[in-house]
Amino acid sequence: KLVLFVPSVGWGAGKVLVMAAGKLVLCVAGIWTCFFAYGILQESIFVYKSPSGEKFKQTMLLLIVEHGVSALVAFLIIALFGQGSDQSWWPYLKSQGIIACAQCGAKFSSNEALKSVSYPIQALAKSSKTLPAMLGCLWSGKAITKLQWAAALGITLGTAGFSMSGKKKGGDIEASPFGIGLLVLSLMCDGTVSAAQQGLRGEKKPLTPYEQMFMTNFGAMLLLLPAAVMTGQWQSGIEFLSANIEILDEVAIFAVCSAFGQVFIFLTISWFGPDSNAKITTLRKMATVLISILWFGHSIVTEQWLFVGLVFASVLAEIGEKLLGGKAKVHDKKKEK
């Protein structure tokens, strides 16, 4: 977390506050802009239909492009701005390999789910940090609070209700059980990533954030390449994009938004800490649900809006608990002094 020392008087105090505020605005604007565009483009790519009525189905090729661009951006930052830790990466291959596999599974499952669920359902299911964190606790053994259990239940019921009420009441947002299963798998992979990254924080000399970004994305790309070739998605995906060049721009911008979105996330963690980053990204995901509904003109029935409210209330309860918990810790430290 960013700790500010503010002098009682003088221009120095104002300068520090202005710089901190500027950094915060930069981080929020960067994350929200990149991932708002990312979400809209992601949905647009999967709902696109060619003149013959065919849809883009080659998820692996899309992810290879995304991870490849992200790895390239991270490598350039390391090389051009000296963001390396000046140590061998060999000791970290196992841990980073686990993270790359889990990240690859999370991305593939969430993208593949868009063939069976609408984007608002995907975004609702993944709008909470508690769900993957709880799944990550299966590895780390970290305790979960009662409010976090309640929030997880609210998010689960809200997402399920949102999907089912759309099917029953005539809304155009619904989901298949297979799609929901893929979202559960994606959350489990997110939990594994969270637990593995938490373990890396205990290293005596950890990798820099951009080294982690490079290794994770490059590793995921290497995992996906042979799978895409063997399943035929590499060849068929290239053929589809070659025949429908109008979506090439969307795929390219999608990958760039993902890469720079990750850069802003690492900047936020570096300047303000992981908790602040979690709050910024969580609120962004909630807003993305509303933007997707408005942008693509999804038909939403009254019951679905109620379930959206349940999910949002659950997520805001999580954030409120963290904020109050942080204030309580600060108060306790002051008492000790």
Image (cartoon, grey):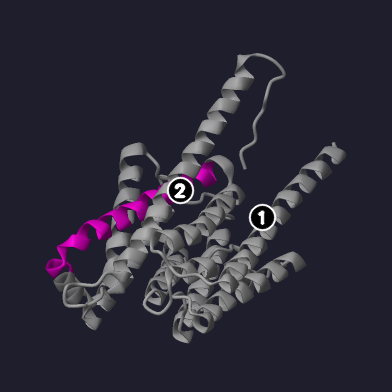
To which residue does mark 1 refer?
319
> Is 264 covered by the magenta stretch?
yes
Residue at image point 51% right, 44% down:
268
Q: Is residue 22 above or below residue 266?
A: above
- Which percent across, then down, holds residue 306? 62, 69
Q: Which residues are magenta?
A: 241-270
Which x, y percent locates residue 47? 31, 70
Is 130 located above or below residue 173 in the figure?
above
| Farthest-out residue, right | 335
Report the residue marked by disc 2: 31
164 left or right of 337?
left
User: CA–CA distance between discs 2 and 1?
Assistant: 18 Å
Q: Position of residue 44 (x, y in %)?
A: 32, 64
Q: How busy is the neighbourhood of tag 2: few (under 14 within 10 Å), some, or many (20 plus)?
A: many
User: Is any atom of residue 135 visible in this view?
Assistant: no
Residue at 47 percent of width and 78 percent of height: 174
Q: Which mark is residue 74?
A: none
